Amino acid sequence: MTTEKPKRRSRAWFEKQDRDGFVHRSWTQKAGHPPDEFDGRPIIGICNTWSELTPCNSHFRELAEFVKRGVLEAGGFPLEFPVMSLGETQLRPTAMLFRNLASMDVEESIRGNPIDGVVLLMGCDKTTPALMMGAASCGLPTIGVSGGPMLNGKFRGKDIGSGTGVWMMSEMVRGGQMTQEEFTEAEGCMNRSSGTCMTMGTASTMASMVEALGMSLPGNAAIPAPDTRRNRLAQLSGRRIVKMVEEDMTMDKIMTREAFENAIRVNAAIGGSTNAVIHLLAIARRIGIELTLEDWDRIGSEMPCLVNLQPSGHYLMEDFYYAGGVPAVMREIQHVLHRDALTVNGRTIGENIEDAPCYNRDVIKPLDNPLMNNAGIAVLKGNLAPNGAVIKPSAASANLLKHRGRAVVFESIEDLRDRLDDPALDIDETCVMVLKNCGPRGYPGMAEVGNMPLPSKVLQKGISDMVRISDARMSGTAYGTVVLHTSPEAAVGGPLALVRNGDMIQLDVHERSLHLEVSNEELARRKAEWVPPAMPTRGYAKLYVEHVEQAHLGADLDFLAGSSGAGIPRESH
Ligand code: FES
């Protein structure tokens, strides 16, 4: 592979007048393209995660057509290509297991093909980081287009949010406050249009991160999927990527350290998902930006939450869009943003948000009257999490942010499900629920099971939150006093593996500490007795567990950190 990157790399395929050039041109013409369509025009790859197995991305074929329209208008040649799609609600054991695999698909599909610039069509949770990671490892001019959130869910005259409403109503059924019939009826009312979850869950958070990084046109994150302005934004993005190729506006010019710092602050201000921590760490490592777990606390934890959206607040993404969306939030916090960070439209963040209006101050709160102060992700350290764990204070109960309680330990998710509602389970609301073996290697794939359901006997007392600790992640739509991403995880012998029933655990979010009240000597004795869990023995799962990094590093595969660029591979024949 050559290291030199020509300005228009597609010419290496199409301009040669030899046998290879014949093959590349001839097989492109067979799709109905006259040769002048790829005779020097920028070739734009449209990376599509459409799949009927990913309901949140089911409208992406239509969206791609609008991108193509824009590419053609600007003088480019669009070629759409599929990559592995990751449907959060269908894929087992967890879509996160395949985020890195999909990112490899994206990276190799871009590098191996005659592509000069890329449009990423991203929607359901993991599709956004997977595409951003893969594209970052190539570094071509790239623009993100998100699928957009669904319209607000409507159930019996009230708004209900996807994900958040599921967690809430299922606990109501278990607590006896809702009937099974009502619960079933809500299924058809919650998710009623195309698009992604309309709470500030992971999909909306990551779409907001893409916008805050400067990797999409302003407004991209919040336009509802069925709103025709979403299609217009796709068309404008298609026009813009052609210009980006002409300007050689590569990803590294936009995804700078300053851009990531902006994104961390925006995540706090929108009440964004804890999953953004892992995904942004992984994306940063792909493009060579030094970003650490500690940066999240240092840069973002003292930020106020301004956006009154579920799961931290009340409203939903449709309301957020009408209120002004991400540009209005960024304008409100512009004093702490790097205003000169460049964005894909060729303007700076500061220029993009200069006149961004806010139309609803109950949805996007003013800086002097936020929804919550000090609401960014907090990073906890201590003998239970030497490499860190995270908590989202804006989704937690204020009275539990400092808590000491007796550990009730579940060795796996199956163990939790088997015993949760056992009347003999020795637990009350003062206890600390501990779930092991749900981290990157342990599940495998670090599933979203960290927001453990509460035991029925606790729910029936009207209690709705308890301190919960695990090495898992939780859905961005979830809430509670939930400590996540504990690193090192239990499956590699981290201290979490050594916790036993009856141990006392201290959580102090203000002090950023997570402490297990067990002596070092006793922990060493338990470690000597510890037996590692069995690991997958073949296929991608084997590759994954052998190479996945811990949560505090972004849970990428160790050999994927960094970039291989977009040099031209050697010919295939
Ligand atoms: Fe796809 Fe929530 S399940 S975005």
Image: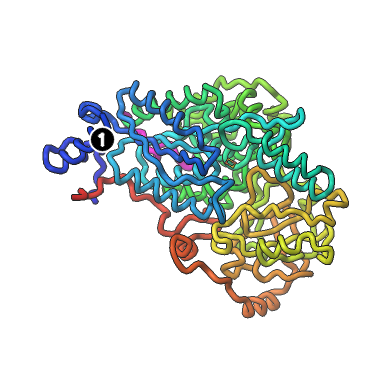
Q: Residue at x 66, y 59 (%)?
A: 470
Q: Where is residue 310 shown, x and y percent of the image? A: 69, 37
Tell me: 106 left or right of 519. left
| Magenta stretch: includes residue 459 | no
Tell me: 385 left or right of 178. left
Q: Residue at x 52, y 30 (%)?
A: 339
**Quarter holding residue 301:** top right
**Quarter holding residue 237:** top left
Q: Where is residue 85 shown, x and y percent of the image? A: 47, 45
| Magenta stretch: includes residue 257 | yes
Magenta part of the chain: 246-258
**Quarter holding residue 558:** bottom left
Q: Where is residue 262 shown, x and y percent of the image? A: 54, 37
Judge whether residue 332 can be spotted in this image: no
Q: Where is residue 307 shown, x and y percent of the image? A: 67, 33
Give the class, few, some or many, for how many residues have Cα within 10 Å of label 1's Cα (few <14, many ≥20).
some
On the image, numbered disc 1 is attached to which residue?
8
Q: Nearer the viewer, residue 393 or 569?
A: 569
Amino acid tagged 1: Arg
- From what the image shows, is residue 458 above or below residue 545? above
Identify the residue at the far left of this view.
18
